[in-house]
Structures are given as C-alpha cells and as structure tokens.
Amino acid sequence: MSNAAQWDALGMKIAYEEAAKGFEEGGVPIGGCLINNKDGTVLGRGHNMRFQKGSPTLHGEISTLENCGRLEGKVYKDTTLYTTLSPCDMCTGAILLYGIPRCVIGESDNFKSPGEEYLKSRGVEVVQMNDEPCKAIMKKFIDTRPQDWFEDIGE
C-alpha cells in the first residue's frame, strides 16, 4: 500500500471518528482532518460544532482548520483535507482560500454540494471514497433530525 493510500485510510478513519464524536455530543455528524502530504503528519482534526457551540459557521471542515491553529500559508499547499461529507460552499471556499490541493470526501449520497465540481474546476484533486459508515451516520442524523439538518445546510 502506498503512503497516499495509507494516509487516505488514516484520514478517513479520523474524520469518521470525529463525525461519530459530534453525533454523540448531539451535533451534526460531519468530521474532518488535515494531513501533510509529505510525511503523513496529522495537522488537525475536528467536527461540526454548530449545535454544541451555537455557531452558524463551525462546520466540520472549518472546525478542522480551526484546530490546526495558525499555520504558514505554504503549509496548506501540500496537504489533504479529509471530510466525511461533500463540502458545502463555505467549506469549499476555505479549501480554495488556503490552497489545499486535495480533498478526500467520505460520501456525497446524502448531500452533494456543487462545491465538488467547483473544486475540480479550480484544480483541486477531489477523491470520493463512497464510505458506507459515513453514509450510515449521516442518514441516521437526517432521518431523526431533519429540521436540524436543513438548518445546517441553510434551507
């Protein structure tokens, strides 16, 4: 198994752990992590904290970046952002803002943002994992808390 494949497996495992933690806390089960492409270092991890912190913007990807702390701009240019769900427009913007060249997505069956195609059009490598555990936890949340889900995606 190549380093990239190992890091993809690790990144998605961490992202799912974060999603599960968020779900257990009563939040939206979307998790993420940021990994350095050169050496596999996990720079940060996080999960959606909108309900836990009463924040309109603390999505899983944003929480991940927040938990990385301040990094030099050049650090982002050789990283992969892992997320359990297709990134919304706000999170897509953060990926582009920091020049993250690669995004690995757990699933987009429950929600597919137009951000995926936009990221590709801007030169970001987008990898779809079609991960069953990611699908299952998100479906469970949407089925049991549809109003909270619609609030999270701005509907």
Image (cartoon, rainbow, N blue to C red):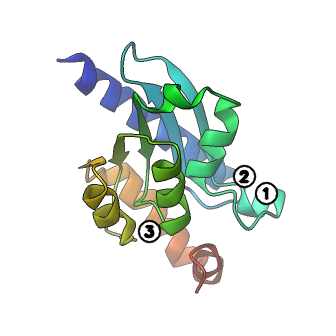
Which residue is at 72% across, 62% downward? 50
Instruction: Measure the alpha-carbon separation of dots 3 and 2.
Output: 17 Å
Which residue is at 48% across, 66% downward? 88
Could you say which disc has been placed on residue 93 in the image? none
Q: Identify residue type, mark 1.
A: Gln
Which quadrant holds residue 112?
Answer: bottom left
In the image, farthest residue toward the top: 39
Label pair 1/3, CB-CB below 8 angstroms: no
Specify which label sits upstream in the sequence, 3 or 2. Answer: 2
Instruction: Measure the alpha-carbon separation of dots 2 and 1.
Output: 7 Å
Residue 131: x and y in percent read 30, 50
Label pair 3/2, CB-CB below 8 angstroms: no
Residue 153: x and y in percent read 56, 75
Residue of label 1:
52
Specify which label sits upstream in the sequence, 2 or 1. Answer: 2
Could you say which disc has been placed on residue 25 in the image? 2
Which is in the foreground here, disc 1 or disc 3?
Answer: 1
Instruction: Measure the alpha-carbon separation of dots 1 and 3.
Output: 20 Å
Could you say which disc has been placed on residue 139 in the image? 3
Label pair 2/1, CB-CB below 8 angstroms: yes
Quick one: SS at disc 3? helix
In the image, farthest residue toward the left: 1
